[in-house]
Image: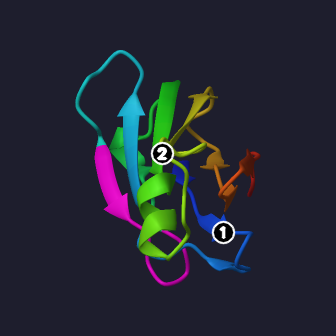
Amino acid sequence: MGCLTTHVLDTARGIAASGLKIELFRVGETAPLREIITNEDGRADGPLLDQGSFVPGVYELHFHAGDYLREGGTVLSDPAFLDLITIRFGISDAEQHYHVPLLLSPFGYSTYRGS
């Protein structure tokens, strides 16, 4: 059975993004499926979705980057260039592992499907 995982790296500081809030939504639903705060390694303590909850569909991860950056001492403009980063992605095969990382800095980010 597949699962969904994520992690966040603060590329501006060269560290794992510890203490960053992430919400997971299934597109079309208003309440988050999961809400986590990243651990010292910039990861959730376990899969965001696994076994019975891991089904094909379109999902969004909401990364609360602005709050994380401010708490880390980064001075941001008002409004911040990046505040809430939303990544929408599809899960088509519930037997595979989907890993959606975020590489973050105050003025840019990247993501990819990892392993």
Q: Which residue shows up at 30% across the image and 52% down it?
A: 35
Along the line of sight, which residue is nearer the eye, 50 or 69?
A: 69
- Numbered label attached to residue 78: 2
**Secondary structure of residue under mark 1:** strand
- Mark 2 residue type: Asp
Magenta-span inclusion, residue 29: no
Residue 91 vertical position relative to residue 48 in the rendered view, above or below: above
Q: Residue 51: where, in percent of width, then height?
A: 40, 48
The residue to which callout 1 is attached is: 9
Residue drawn at x 49%, y 30% as measured from the top left? 59
Confirm or deny contact between disc 1 and disc 2 (CB under 8 A): no
Considering depth in this image, is 73 or 25 the residue closer to the camera? 73
Tell me: residue 14, above or below residue 60: below
* Model colouring: rainbow
Residue ID at (45%, 32%): 55
Looking at the rendering, the stretch of residues picked out in magenta corresponds to: 34-43
- Give the amino acid at mark 1: Leu
Magenta stretch encompasses residue 42: yes
* Residue 70, image x, y percentages: 46, 66
Q: Nearer the viewer, residue 63 or 59?
A: 63
Query: Which disc, if any, is residue 94?
Result: none
At label 2, counting other C-alpha atoms closer than 10 Å, the crowd grade (few under 14, some 14-19, many 20 or more) is few
Residue 9: x and y in percent read 66, 69
Q: Does the magenta stretch mainly form a helix, a strand or a loop?
A: loop
- The kind of secondary structure element at disc 2 is loop
